Image (cartoon, rainbow, N blue to C red):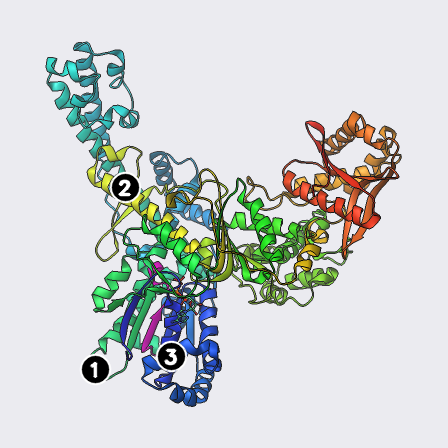
Amino acid sequence: MGFQPFLALSASAGSGKTFALSVRYVALLFLGESSSSILAATFTNKAAAEMRHRVVEALRRLDEADFAPFLGELAKQTGLSPDEILAKRPGVLRRFLDSPTHIVTLDSFFVSVLKAGALEIGLDPGFVTKEEASVGLQEAFLEELDREGMLPVLVELAIQMERRRVEGMTESLASLYAQDPLLPPFPEGDGTLRGLEGEIEALRASLYERVQQVGASATAVRNFAPATVAELFAKSVFNHPSLEEHRNYRKYLPKDPRIEEEYQQLRTLLGRWAAARERAVLHRLGRLYDHYRNTRISRAKSRNMLDFDDLGYFAYRLLYESLSKDLLYFRLDSRFRHILLDEFQDTSTLQFLLLKPLIDEIFAGKGQSDFRTFFYVGDTKQSLYRFRGGVEELFDRVAEHYGIEVNPLSHNYRSAKGIVESVNRWFAEVMPGYLPQIPQSGKEGYVEVLEAEEPLAEATAQALRLIDAGIDPERIAFLVATNKEGKELQERCVEAGIPTVLQTSSSLRTLPQIAALVRMAEHLYREEALDAEALLRRSGRKEHPDLGWYRPSMRPVEVLHRLLESYAAFDNDPNFLRLLEFAAGYESLPEFLEEFESSRIGVAPHTLRGARILTIHGSKGLEFDYVILLDRSGRGSSERDALIPRYNENLHIERFFYRISGRERFDETYAELLEERKAAAEKDRLNLLYVALTRAAEGMIVLKKPEQSIFEPLGMVPMRRGELPKIEDESKVQEEAPRIPDVVLSRYGRQEEPPTSEDEGEGPDYEAILFGTALHYALEMMEPFGPEGIEGALDAVRNRYGAQLSEEQIAAIASRMEALMQDEPFTQMLRGARIQKEQPLAHRGKLLQIDLLLDYGDRFRILDYKSSRKFAEHHRRQLRTYIEAVESITGRPAEGALVYLTEEGVEIEGLGMEN
Ligand SMILES: Nc1ncnc2c1ncn2[C@@H]1O[C@H](COP(=O)(O)OP(=O)(O)OP(=O)(O)O)[C@@H](O)[C@H]1O
């Protein structure tokens, strides 16, 4: 086939696009090109790391059987025989390792471009990058508005946009900033709104009178009764293009033909009113935007910190307004002769514009003897980033613009036959232009669609099933819809004893131990002595270490280091080194804490083992042997941006439409645009499902909700195809099942697990944990165990938790204890039993702590207190573990009960062994 210098591959998931990209990269090396002249850009850090890995592995292991397909492709592309390739390999590998490489994410490439030319635009090249805009941005913006006398404009706009919160407006401004180079000019204010409102009012009044005069019904008359223009605009009568079509009016129209005429005029005027409102909003927004942008620019410069949007803004200015290409290449110390782009369907227009000067440079040499190439791959079925400016249309436009051949690939090399065929069946009908893939694997694989009311709960059960079938957790990935669900699932996995790695974000601050450690530092700084166990429970320690060494004058790195020493369980994790490195850059804790919150320190790769938990978005381009795909728990959100952009041929924004509910009835262009957006949103949803369902190589379990499922558009029904692998040693499975949850991690000491509930996006509710912990403590300290012991127990609680609990909370603890002591079923259970409180048990290498163990001589009852019902299912599973442990240790039967001590009173839920 030879080497085609300009080529694009547009092909389905698993068809080998990234594989082809790696082959091409290596082929260029064998053709004598230096790695410093090749730019290979991907979307995520993970993909870039993966690509580097593939290239190095290929160069090292080309002679191994696993790399035969790679070698075969390489031979085709380079025109060399496999033997020639293998003979050249050592030299190529040496040169590769000795030269700088540019296998990077687009964002990090733009960072290096910007660093190279920073001084040109008044930036300090030592700037750091951050994930999101900083906390004080809004205040700084408001200060700027105040200084410039612009606050009244903000207020007027707020009234016009019916926004009660400043945040709503700064969000709109932030989204303008994110696409600054693509913005159309903002309209001038034309002051037509008032005049139009007068005209509309006059027409309304006239119609009101006319419909009254012809004797129309009260309802028909009411439609034109006095109202503000906005109220009138919202009326459903305007759903009818003409009153002829409206049965309340039809028969009266002949009596006064002016009615229909005026109705039509009114509709036209309302349409113009919406457009005038749009102009007024955009005009004010434009005025504010200038100041918003100033604030962003000057803050980025003065703090020397750039987020993604700043990066795009400055890189554009640099490339298009400030710097010659030659100077840029000189500064970058390389001149790219070859560009390879992965996942091109998700490239935003702005990103493309930033690359365009480099691509143009390549095509400038086209036709000459100079060897320059451009290659990109993608799949518009997998485009997911429309919401942040990804435009899949770019794929074909770029090919057309540069005259690049676009080739398909029709085989699937990733997934087993059963998976490929199931995916073909699900999508053939619903995705326009879907080309069924041809499975390449000889394996049948495993596919199961299960209905589950609670996908999060079912997911752990299914993972245990896979693990019990002998599948290493490392080979399993859970795919979830949102980061929040990822966190919740991880909690459940911890408690089910399944090791997991949460990859919903690659940021260090999302690692539980790191987050806990920083939270500890924060508590020290704020002098809030919140229960350290609750925060650092994952460290596996029991005692609260002495933190008396803390001094407010200490540097952040010192505080963190001392905390690490105090909680020795954190040894040897390179992520802690990264944290310390980051902290070393700050002099004071508050400064460190603020920056840490929006930091972008990557997680050290390969430091963690276990099943992966990722969002579907995060799984793009990746593959896993086994995938458990979870339906979304809550409902998805629908698009509600105030400004709807319409793009021109160059994919710049031609104009914005201002969203007003019902405007589509008065404005055809707006109606069409809205329809296009809806169709696009629909397509995005399908794309997301496509990405999710094409990640598995060997097995896939889909957990679908019976109702309101994201899988509904596919007509997916419960099914099963293929078999899970058979584990050779059946006895091992017997012995291991049911698996023992890792109780040391999930629950330790007396405290309840931190709830990560639906309604709090912000993680554990430490108030509730503290309350639960104190309540447990009170019950433990109650001596004797009866109403007479309550007073003494409360004293103990005051001694230990007095500083953190309010008097009301202590009173609430007292009343819950009293309720328990008076509860008939509870006191009944105590009769004839030897009572053991906080009984520790060692079982299968794990330490369990039982709240109340009642020993009746021939059998046991285990009671577990809970202060909330939030995690009932979790509590039940936990209790079953305790029952099993007690039975196996003592050889006597045991049963258990959950004792819920809630505001409503005492409720006891009994639980026997189920199997
Ligand atoms: N020609 C080939 N011969 C053998 N194996 C291949 C070939 N092409 C791809 N593969 C393997 O198939 C799997 C999927 O390939 P790859 O990740 O390149 O697909 P992709 O098209 O980039 O998928 P996605 O669109 O999901 O990113 C990989 O494990 C890869 O090594």
Comparing marks 1 and 3, which lies closer to the viewer?
3
Left or right relative to 467: residue 307: left
Comparing marks 2 and 3, which lies closer to the viewer?
3
Percent across and percent down for residue 295 are: 41, 53
Vertical placement of residue 728 versus 905, above or below: below
Q: Which residue is mark 3?
A: 72
- Name the N-terminal-most of marks 2 and 3: 3
Which amino acid type is marked by label 3? Answer: Gly
Residue 219, which numbered label?
none
Q: Which residue is mark 2?
A: 674
- Name the N-terminal-most of marks 1 and 2: 1
- Residue depicted at 17% across the width and 17% down the height: 250
Q: Which residue is mark 1?
A: 368
- Read off the magenta span: 332-348
Disc 2 + disc 3, Cβ < 8 Å: no
Left or right relative to 50: residue 207: left
